Amino acid sequence: MSRIVVGVSGASGVVIALRLVAELCARKHEVHLVVTDAAKEVIKHEVGKAWRPPKGVVRHGLRDFRSPLNSSSFVTDAMVVVPCSMKTLSAIANGYAENLLIRAADTVLRAGRKLVVVPRETPLSLSAIENMTALKRAGAVILPPCVSYYHRPRGVDDMTDFFVGKILDALGMENDLYRRWGEKVR
Ligand SMILES: Cc1cc2nc3c(=O)[nH]c(=O)nc-3n(C[C@H](O)[C@H](O)[C@H](O)COP(=O)(O)O)c2cc1C
């Protein structure tokens, strides 16, 4: 069992986060969750209602600077920021820890643990590209939710599973959420 932090910020694609958390819980991982205010709004818009995370998920308030996620002494295996808005991307890249999500990501980086960032925006500004470069240099995995067609998605659910599968791959977790290149068509 791994201890995984999931940070959800206010970019489009929040359904990827919901699906990821469900998958991590189904695999009995310990999930710690931080959701920004903007993400709550995007969830209402894109999912149609407020989100109730699965039972067992440990929720942390965005302004809770007494949360264990503030400290590297709270040992975690990895953190995923999904989706990652350009604002949160910029803050993590520049160490501007003005909320718990950003502080937790900074803590994961400075402790040399795995950080997976799923930035969502198009087209990209120069500052966004430079912030991704900075985070890549700092050791993060930059995993934009780029659509692909080689696995023959039949719709949005297949595409979402593809992104979640890619995130699990980055976390080193075996999965068959998408058809890999060379596998037979199901
Ligand atoms: C429906 C909706 C979709 C949005 N999609 C994006 C997006 O894909 N990428 C992005 O960087 N910002 C997006 N935004 C804007 C962010 O929510 C906004 O910049 C916010 O301040 C981000 O705050 P946070 O990083 O603290 O969550 C979106 C906003 C709304 C309402």
Image (cartoon, helix red, strand yellow):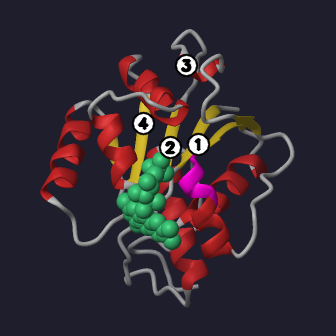
**CA distance for labels 1 and 2:** 5 Å
Q: Quadrant of the C terminus?
A: bottom right
Q: Main secondary structure of the magenta part?
A: helix
Q: Quadrant of residue 30?
A: top right
Compared to residue 14, the image places residue 184 above or below, namely below
Which of marks 4 and 1 precedes in the sequence?
Answer: 1
Disc nearest the viewer among 3 and 2: 3
Give the number of the disc on residue 6: 1
Task: Write down the residue under mark 2.
Answer: 80
10 Å crowding of disc 2: few (<14), some (14-19), many (20+): many
CA gap between label 4 and label 3 equals 15 Å
Q: CA distance from mark 1 to mark 4?
A: 10 Å
Q: Which tag, 4 or 2, sits closer to the chain's start?
A: 2
State the separation of the CA atoms marked 3 and 1: 14 Å
Q: Residues within 10 Å of mark 4 (few under 14, many from 20)?
A: many
Q: In this view of the protein, can residue 88 be seen by the observer?
A: yes
What amino acid does circle 1 point to? Val
User: Whole-percent x and y of residue 10?
Assistant: 50, 57
The answer to whether mark 4 and mark 2 are in CB contact below 8 A is yes
Q: Amino acid at mark 2?
A: Val
* Mark 4 vs mark 2, CA separation in Å: 6 Å
Picture disc at residue 115: 4
Crowding near pointer 3: few (<14 within 10 Å), some, many (20+)?
many
Residue 75, percent from left and from top: 58, 17
Q: Which residue is mark 3?
A: 70
